[in-house]
Image (cartoon, rainbow, N blue to C red):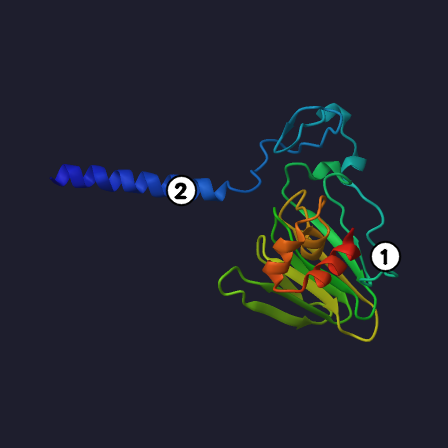
Amino acid sequence: MADLRMVALSLLTLTLTSTFITLSLAHEPSPLQDFCVADFHNPVRVNGFACLHPDRVTPDHFHLRGLNVVGNTSNPLGSFVNRPTVLEIPGLNTLGISTVRVDYAPKGLVPPHRHPRASEILTVLKGTVLAGFVTSDPENRLVSKVLQKGDVFVFPFGLIHFQQNIGHGNAVTVAFLSSQNPGVIAIANAVFGSNPPINAEVLKKAFQADESIVHKLQAQFQ
C-alpha cells in the first residue's frame, strides 16, 4: 500500500510539474540563439517569422528612428499611437517585447482595447493621464488611477484597458509590451465596425439598445 501511495504521489508531482512548465511556455518561448532577425521574404511561418541568415544581419535590423517625434493628434480621438512591432524592427523577432508611444491632445483618448498576446507596462512622460482596466466577468471591476509624470501603471495580460489625458496640456506616454507583435483589438471598432457587420439584432439585444442606435453606431465605424 505504501508503494502505491509513493507511485501516486510521484505521478501527481510529475503532473503538476508538467502543468507548470506548460503554463510557463504558454506565451512566446525563449530564444534558442543570440537573435533571430525576421526574414519577411521567407514563406515559412511558425509562431513568428523565420530567421534571416546571421551573415545578412545589420545594426539597422535592431534600430528604429522617430519615437521622439510628436504624433498628429488632430483626429476624433485626440490621440496618436506610434506602435513599432517586429514589422518595423525585425530584430524583435522571438524576443517577446515591443514598445509604443502615445501622444494625447487635451482630453485625448486611447479608447478601450485589449492586446490578445501581451501584458503592458505604461509610463507617463508628460501630463496627467487617467489609466484603467476592467477585470474579467463576472466581477467586471474597474481598476483605474490618475497618473502624473514619472508614474507607472500595469495592464494585465489580455484585459480591456484605456488611457485618457485629463490635464490641461498635451500628454505623452510610453509603454512596453510582452510580445513582439501584441496585436490590438479596439472594442468599439471590433463590435460596431466588423466586416461584414454583426447582425443588428445581436447588438440590439447585447447592449439593450434601440436598433436605430445600433445602426448609428455601426455607421460611425464602417
Residue 203 seen: yes
Q: Position of residue 95 (x, y in %)?
A: 64, 40
Callout 2: helix, strand or loop? Answer: helix
Residue 76 shown left or right of residue 16 in the figure? right
Q: Which mark is residue 19?
A: 2
Residue at horizontal 81 percent and vertical 36 percent from the top: 60
Quarter occupied by residue 46: top right
Seen from this angle, which residue lies furthest bottom?
168
Amino acid on which disc 1 is placed: Gly
| Vertical side of 221 occupied by 7: above or below | above
Residue visible at 67% across and 64% down? 210
Q: Nearer the viewer, residue 9 or 56?
A: 9
Residue 72 percent across, percent down from the top left: 88, 58
Question: Label 2 is placed on what type of residue?
Answer: Thr
**Label 1, on which residue?**
71
Q: Residue 120: tell me if it is visible.
A: no
The residue depicted at 71 percent of the width and 67 percent of the height is 150
